[in-house]
Image (cartoon, coloured by chain):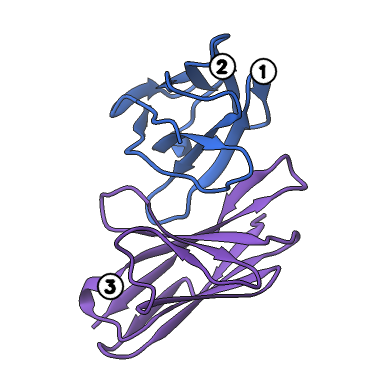
Amino acid sequence: GAVVSQHPSRVICKSGTSVKIECRSLDFQATTMFWYRQFPKQSLMLMATSNEGSKATYEQGVEKDKFLINHASLTLSTLTVTSAHPEDSSFYICSAEDRGRRNTIYFGEGSWLTVV
Amino acid sequence: DAKTTQPTSMDCAEGRAANLPCNHSTISGNEYVYWYRQIHSQGPQYIIHGLKNNETNEMASLIITEDRKSSTLILPHATLRDTAVYYCIVLASNTGKLIFGQGTTLQVKP
């Protein structure tokens, strides 16, 4: 079964509102999680590294004030898309590394965001 | 992280072995080779990973050449459900940061 879970799997929001996506490691602790986005027919693009107890680090070109990341516990990271616009509509995916399983990196099921 | 090169697409007959190649000629000594696959509208599924020794699990086998510059993912008996995009990624140890390329689209045909 899944070891990394995301919620919600699908969400529709209005332009200008904010939406939060959760990423949970189910049976292991993760000091670091990663957030990706994927547009149709494209590969995954790394957005940011979520660090438990400290600030997230963002990849070049990703706006930190628009994509707020909070990693409040060793099993939960959240991504908040603020002031969402239609161009933010995408598939958002998180990952986490399980150091107890040979450093295997698992991905969540993904969250589809549609901004209308 | 070292870049990888994969064929854009491959076909495989159902029930036959699918052999997916990956070139990573600039890999460093502490970098692992990871394989994932993604079926449409789902998050990537972990398949297997290794450093220098060949690896096998319930899903697949990973064959890494002795010089570590290339590897092959083997799905021993492909089924229609194995149709997906397969990603080969090289990862520096303890970073967790996977950089995805375009992958190989494997089409398993009846």
Q: Quadrant of the C terminus of chain B?
A: top left
Image quadrant where residue B26 sits: top left
Q: Chain A: what color?
A: purple
Residue B64 has which mark? Answer: 2
Mark 1, secondary structure of its residue? loop
Q: How many numbered discs?
A: 3
Which percent across, then down, holds residue A72? 65, 77
Image quadrant where residue B109 sits: top left
Q: The blue chain is which one?
A: B
How far is the residue under mark 2 from the one under mark 3?
A: 39 Å
Say which amino acid is labelled 2.
Ile
Do the dots labelled 2 and 3 sit on one chain?
no
Mark 3, secondary structure of its residue? helix
Mark 3 Cα-neighbour bin, 10 Å: few <14, some 14–19, many ≥20: some
How far is the residue under mark 1 from the one under mark 2?
A: 7 Å
Are the residues at dot 1 and dot 2 in contact (C-beta closer than 8 Å)? yes
Residue B53 has which mark? Answer: 1
Label 3 resides on the chain identified as A
Which percent across, then down, holds residue A107? 55, 54
Which percent across, then down, holds residue B44? 48, 48
Are the residues at dot 2 and dot 3 in contact (C-beta closer than 8 Å)? no
Residue of label 3? A88
Query: Who's the residue at 41% across and 64% down the image?
Result: A92
Is residue B50 in sight in this rendering? yes
Image quadrant where residue A86 sits: bottom left
